[in-house]
Amino acid sequence: MTPVQAMAGRAAEAGPQAPPIPPARPASVASVASVPTVAIVEGPIDVDALVRAVGDPGAGATVLFLGTVRETNEGRAVSGIDYQAYAAMAEREMRVIADEAASRFRTRALAVHHRVGHLAVGVPSVAIAAAHERRAPAFDAARYVIEQLKRRVPIWKREHYVDGTREWVDPTGGAVDRTPGELA
């Protein structure tokens, strides 16, 4: 059972008031969105659109963080990663984190996109853009968002290794013994 299936099963058990699992949205940012903007996306992250989304003539700094799939993890050669998320829940927590960062660091604009699906080595899985009058708070806001996202947002990853094996990996550490989200 995948993590998303486990979350869907829990939602179904909760009864009719449980929200349905909405599909992830395409990766583009159509226009300057409300600040901050967050999204779980299925396709490639449009970095240029994300930077445009936080564009502000009053910002002296725009920081862009890209988290990419790396070729090794804990000494093992990686060929790719599958990311899965319960989109509604993940976006809700991403919004809370983005709101915290915007308030704490007083950003002028903030945008966060995380991709789901199978990603090859070198492909961006997460992008965070932060705009502020000064560079230090822009960097601090982006750092806060990525650290909190990895700790709190229900996004699961399964690494595929060059030797043909694969395993679910705890985003805050190493491999896990069971599929994240499995019912105990």
Image: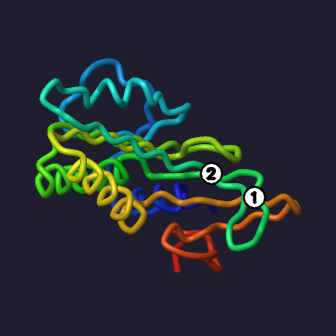
Answer left or right for 63 relative to 1. left
Q: How is the image coloured?
A: rainbow
User: Secondary structure under badge 1?
Assistant: strand
Specify the quadrant of the image occupied by residue 114. top left
Whether label 1 touches label 2, CB < 8 Å: yes
Specify the quadrant of the image occupied by residue 128. top left
Of residue 131 and residue 101, the one placed in the foreground of this image is: 131
The N terminus: image quadrant: bottom right
Q: Position of residue 41 (x, y in %)?
A: 47, 37
Answer left or right for 121 relative to 27. right
Compared to 156, does 20 lie above or below? above
The numbered mark at residue 69 is 2
Compared to 91, does 133 lie above or below? above
Q: Around disc 1, counting alpha carbons within 10 Å, would you say few (fewer than 14), some (14 to 19), or many (20 or more)?
A: many
Answer left or right for 93 relative to 181. left
Looking at the rendered structure, the kind of residue marked 1 is Val
Q: Position of residue 117 (x, y in %)?
A: 60, 43
Looking at the rendered structure, the kind of residue marked 2 is Val
The numbered mark at residue 78 is 1
What residue lies at 37% left-to-right and 30% top-to-bottom?
A: 50
What residue lies at 49% left-to-right and 33% top-to-bottom?
A: 45
Q: Position of residue 139 (x, y in %)?
A: 30, 51
Q: Around disc 2, counting alpha carbons within 10 Å, would you say few (fewer than 14), some (14 to 19), or many (20 or more)?
A: many
Residues under labels 1 and 2: Cα distance? Answer: 9 Å
